[in-house]
Amino acid sequence: MVTPTQQWAAAVLALGLAAGLYFWARSGPPSTASANGSAAAWPAGPAGSEPEVPRIDLSRLESPKGEAAAGRRDLFDYGVPPTPPPTPPPLVLPAPVPASAAPTGPVSVPLPLLNVRYVGAIEDKRGLKVAVFLTERDEVLTGQAGQVVGNRFRIVRIGLESVDIQEVGSDHTRRIALGGK
């Protein structure tokens, strides 16, 4: 007696054989090798002709190259550089401010405060203290008294529970408590 599992296995086997015969019949004759030993590429060109095989033109390596500006040459580009895009039209500025309303001294735009937390200080046997800060992006900054940290502030004094920092380019000094901003 034939079980349903055996019937399914026979059906799958018959379907696989039918698919294999179908694809074998459609493949046509096997491709022949060309005169130089390489197989012909598929799909073929016009009837009776072999497809064109791309060649690497090594003679253009010795051809003269155009002059390129220093730092603007693409090492992998052998052609002429593309033309730059056209320049935009000039901006139209508003009317000038009267001299009486213009600021008289130099205008300094303050940098936004660097949000750092004072994590603590490390002291070695010689008494050398190093302050440890943590930025809002979880970057660790360290420095001793007198050093510039993060290109934004100078450490003025390192205490037990606080540190005094001075903004670079100004006389503004602020105190940061341990664990605070």
Image (cartoon, rainbow, N blue to C red):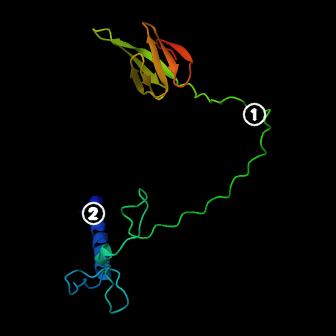
Residues 5 and 119: in front is 119
View extreme (bottom): residue: 48
View extreme (top): residue: 160
Residue in view at x 25 percent, y 83 percent: 31
Q: Is residue 80 above or below residue 101?
A: below
Callout 1: SS: loop
Residue 102 circle label: 1
Question: Which three-letter amino acid code belongs to the residue tagged 1?
Answer: Ala
Residues 126 and 50: in front is 126
For the N terminus, which image quadrant?
bottom left
Q: Position of residue 39 (x, y in %)?
A: 24, 80
Q: Is residue 145 above or below residue 35?
A: above
Asked whether the residues under the numbered discs 1 and 2 touch, taking CB atoms below 8 Å apart as contact, a structural biologist would say no
Q: Position of residue 132 (x, y in %)?
A: 40, 18
The quarter of the displayed image where residue 99 is located: top right
Residues 38 and 8: in front is 38
Residue in view at x 40 percent, y 25 percent: 140
How far, Cα to Cα, is label 1 from label 2? 93 Å
View extreme (left): residue: 37
For residue 85, side relative to residue 21 (left or right): right
Residue in view at x 20 percent, y 87 percent: 35
Which of discs 1 and 2 lies nearer the camera? The answer is 1
Residue 9 circle label: 2
Q: Position of residue 66 (x, y in %)?
A: 41, 70
Q: Is residue 41 above or below residue 171?
A: below
For residue 150, side relative to residue 109 (left or right): left
Q: Position of residue 18 (x, y in %)?
A: 30, 75
